[in-house]
Image (cartoon, rainbow, N blue to C red):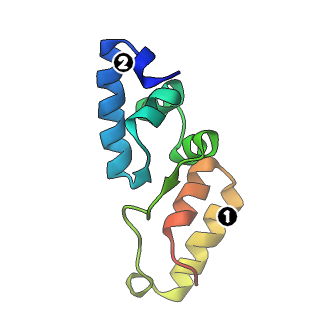
Amino acid sequence: MRFDQLTRAQKQKAQGVLQRLRAEGVETSVSQVGKYFDDACEWDAGTITMATLLDRTGWTRSAPVETIHRAELPAGVLRHVRAVLSADGTAESAEALELLPEV
């Protein structure tokens, strides 16, 4: 759906979702939020993960908002956390893996 086809309330919702997306490092525009309004609202409501939203829309993140720096974790701990998240196989774990540095 195009942004100009949204109701006034939907446009306000799209503006709010856009601000939250930008805070998460997502590079998009209000017209793109309008185009993928239902998906964006699902993410905002917590129904889908950020990874799912990015897959559906093709949007990208400029950088993870919060990353764990390599110096903050011992190598053994980092390897263990990565192994556990990899084995889990959920979308949430995949999203968490993106935030962890390589060992």
The reply to whether dot 1 and dot 2 touch (C-beta < 8 Å) is no
Res 46 visible: no
Tell which of 93 and 39 is nearer to you.
39
- Give percent across and percent down for residue 10: 36, 18
Q: Is residue 90 above or below residue 15?
A: below
- Picture residue at 59% right of the left edge, 75% below the top: 80
Tell which of 42 and 88 is nearer to you.
42
- Whether residue 23 sits left or right of residue 70 in the image: it is left
Q: Which residue corresponds to mark 1? A: 86
- Give percent across and percent down for residue 55: 63, 45
Badge 2 element: helix
Q: How crowded is mark 1: few (under 14 residues within 10 Å), some or many (20 or more)?
A: some
- Whether residue 52 sits left or right of residue 18 in the image: it is right
Badge 2 amino acid:
Gln
- Picture residue at 56% right of the left edge, 71% below the top: 81
Res 23 visible: yes
Query: For the image shown, how many numbered marks are present on the structure?
Result: 2
Q: Residues within 10 Å of mark 2 (few under 14, many from 20)?
A: some
What numbered label is drawn on residue 100?
Answer: none
Badge 1 element: helix
- Measured in 3D between alpha carbons, the distance from the residue under mark 1 to the one under mark 2, in whole angstroms, is 38 Å
- Give percent across and percent down for residue 30: 38, 35
Q: Which residue corresponds to mark 2? A: 10
